[in-house]
Amino acid sequence: MTPSTSIPKANASLSSLANVVQCFSTRYGSTPELVVSSPGRINLIGEHTDYNLGYVLPAAIDKYIHVAIRKRADQQLTIFAADLNSTYQGAIGNWEKSPLQWPDYLLGVLKELEGETGTIPGLDICFGGDIPAGAGLSSSAAIECGLARAVNDLLGLKLTKIQLVQLAQAAENRFVGVQCGIMDQFASMFGMKDKAILLDCRSLKYEYIPLELNQYAILLLDSQVKHQLAGSAYNVRREQCDMGVKALRKVYPHVNSLRDANRAMIEYTLKDRIPDLVYNRCKYVVEENLRLQVGCEALRRNDLVSFGKKMFASHVGLSKLYEVSCPELDYLVDLARLEHAIIGARMMGGGFGGCTINLIRKAFINEVVDRIQESYFQKFGNSPTPIVCQLSNGTTTISS
């Protein structure tokens, strides 16, 4: 069977906004009180730098999780995952992890909201969307931010957007067990159409960077390799970075994270004090922060070609130094390097699977994808799913 060359702007929709609302009405016998749409995100450059308190350059995209919700008169909690056709039933205040796993992302948010604001009522919830799970587009952050915003607006809690972001991150850290940084939730909540977000993950100061694509487009290629971050090598990488920081602090007491380190510190102080593996992790993070800042200067000049070169360099670091790539992602980036129409490509997300992100000339998308799919199919026996995406606004209340 030969690979397909259909290029959707959005992946085959698992559950549109209308589907989620209809699903809610069918299951609960009434329309929802509130509906919130929360986008997935891409990250143009700056991977694994967020939990090292460095810089990232994400953007929200036009793929969403929709959350429909209403209050109950009791303390019962019912959550229906439309795309999975799966139901969780429990009670507010009974915060135990579910063997289904998917409810944990929502339970963690509700637990954090309860801790922040006091008792919350029982809820009926239905959610679904078109963000492919495991593709590196942060469906988990979209779910967390969507629910946090929905409960906030439904109950009139008046939490700020940054409070909701921090709460959603805390839910994933504390309840789900993934020690993620703040980038995914921040991008999902604060996204703006046609702009990327230059975010300082230490101060949380941010700047919108116009992304004038003109004759270019953002093409995601889903490797079809699914990753699971919880309990995986993701947390190990964070521990290795912490080891580097502890070693640096013995010489430079002001170093509280790899954000505070520079190349000279890494090369002349750290290298002889830690194992080579930990050195490689730290070297990558410091270099990635520098790449991102130079890349942002290129975007301000509307120099996409120079920015694309930084993307290619980022992938080399992620693959060889940080070691969070996989053969499929490396192969997709190698194929991208052979295409004159692609000016930048790298793996995106936590790693070990998911998507590559590519800057490509619009006029050549179909033929380039044909070639890449054919080569990938011959090597791995399946085809990467192409997704052309646009930058969108962040988490939004649709109705009330």
Image (cartoon, rainbow, N blue to C red):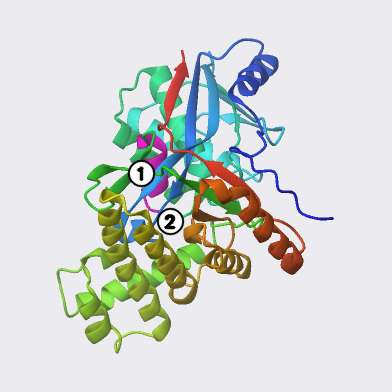
Whether residue 249 appears in magenta in the rendering, the answer is no
Q: Is 72 left, or right, of 190 in this rendering?
A: right
Query: Can residue 185 be seen at all in this image of the molecule?
Result: no
Q: Position of residue 56 (x, y in %)?
A: 34, 53
362, above or below 268, in the image: above
Kind of residue sitting beneath label 2: Gln
Alpha carbons under labels 2 and 1: distance apart: 30 Å
Q: Residue at x 39, y 85 (%)?
A: 275
The circle on residue 369 is none
The circle on residue 179 is 2
Element marked by disc 2: loop
Q: Which residues are magenta?
A: 179-191
196, above or below 20, in the image: below
Q: Position of residue 116 (x, y in %)?
A: 34, 33
The circle on residue 211 is 1
Magenta segment, prevailing SS (helix, strand or loop): helix
Q: Are marks 2 and 1 in contact (CB under 8 Å)?
A: no
Number of numbered markers: 2
| Of 367 and 173, the residue lying toward us | 367
